[in-house]
Image: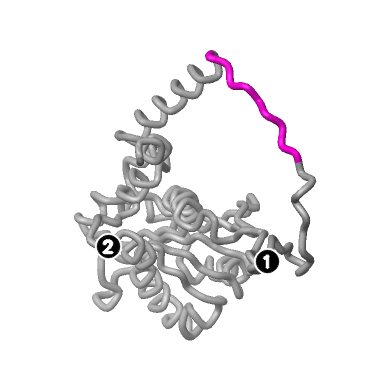
Amino acid sequence: MKRIFLDTETTGLDPRQGHRVIEVGCIEMVDRRQTGEKLHFYLNPQRAVDPGALEVHGLSDEFLADKPTFAEKIHELLPFIKDAEIIAHNASFDVGFLDAEFARLKLGKFSEHVGKVTDTLQMAREMFPGQRNSLDALCNRLGVNNAHRTLHGALLDSEILSEVFLAMTRGQDSLMMDSGQGEVGMAGHEIDFSSLKLPEIEVSQADIELHEAYLAGLDKEVKGTCQWRKLLAQP
């Protein structure tokens, strides 16, 4: 199943009060690799943007005035998301707004058009109970660079979310499974590693210094100690 990382920006916080979607950003991933396929558009909500929402995403009424409506872009969105696993951070927010937009077009619920919906906020709460689990907090915790994120933007946030998701799920999609007797490949055949010899490579002082410089750069980008150094510091 392909994965679509999705984010929206809106005119306000509650679709039940008539607030609308004004930006949609989607990134496609297959086999844990981005395919290069993206979908991104701004929308005319046919209503004013709340001042509080404007401070978050910076999308003004004037900017949105000449943009297409949701109804005019639905023919692009539907085939892009069809039968995919949709991954969103605080998915209930995005899905609630999309449900309202779909209802206006008599298209049923958003979830009826996709394979499943995965909420990375819920995943993070289970992995890091009692901690802040906003997208920015997860970036800092997992070493994902978000220095270029000054305002919320649907496409940028989808890009960042895809990196956060990969960091959160690293190791879950291993090509090998423990059979209890040895390593077993995807086809179920046992693989003999007894004759495998790995080369020993001596690390030069120059390589060590380059590695340290790289880690220092990561520290600066994530505004703290990167995950590699935290792991190395563990007893």
Verify whether residue 162 appears in magenta: no
Quadrant for the C terminus in the image: top left
- In the rendered structure, are the residues bearing label 1 and label 2 in contact, judged by CB atoms less than 8 Å apart? no
Q: Helix, strand or loop at disc 2?
A: loop
Q: Residues within 10 Å of mark 1 (few under 14, many from 20)?
A: few
**On screen, 99 above or below 30?**
below
Alpha carbon distance from label 1 to label 2: 35 Å
Crowding around mark 2 (Cα neighbors within 10 Å: few <14, some 14 to 19, many 20+) is few
Percent x, y of residue 91? 38, 68
Q: Is residue 44 visible?
A: no
What span is in magenta? 197-205
Magenta-colored stretch includes residue 198: yes
Circle 2 residue: 129
List x then y, in percent, for residue 127.
36, 61
Q: Is residue 234 above or below residue 46?
A: above
Q: Residue at x 45, y 55 (%)?
A: 168
Left or right: 28 in relation to 184: left
Report x, y in % for residue 175.
67, 59
What is the quadrant of residue 38 in the picture? Answer: bottom right
Q: Which residue is mark 1?
A: 181
20 or 207, which is in the foreground?
207
Colour setup of the view: one colour
Query: Looking at the rendered structure, which numbered label has been put on residue 159?
Result: none
Q: Position of residue 62 (x, y in %)?
A: 33, 50
Amino acid at the residue labelled 2 = Pro
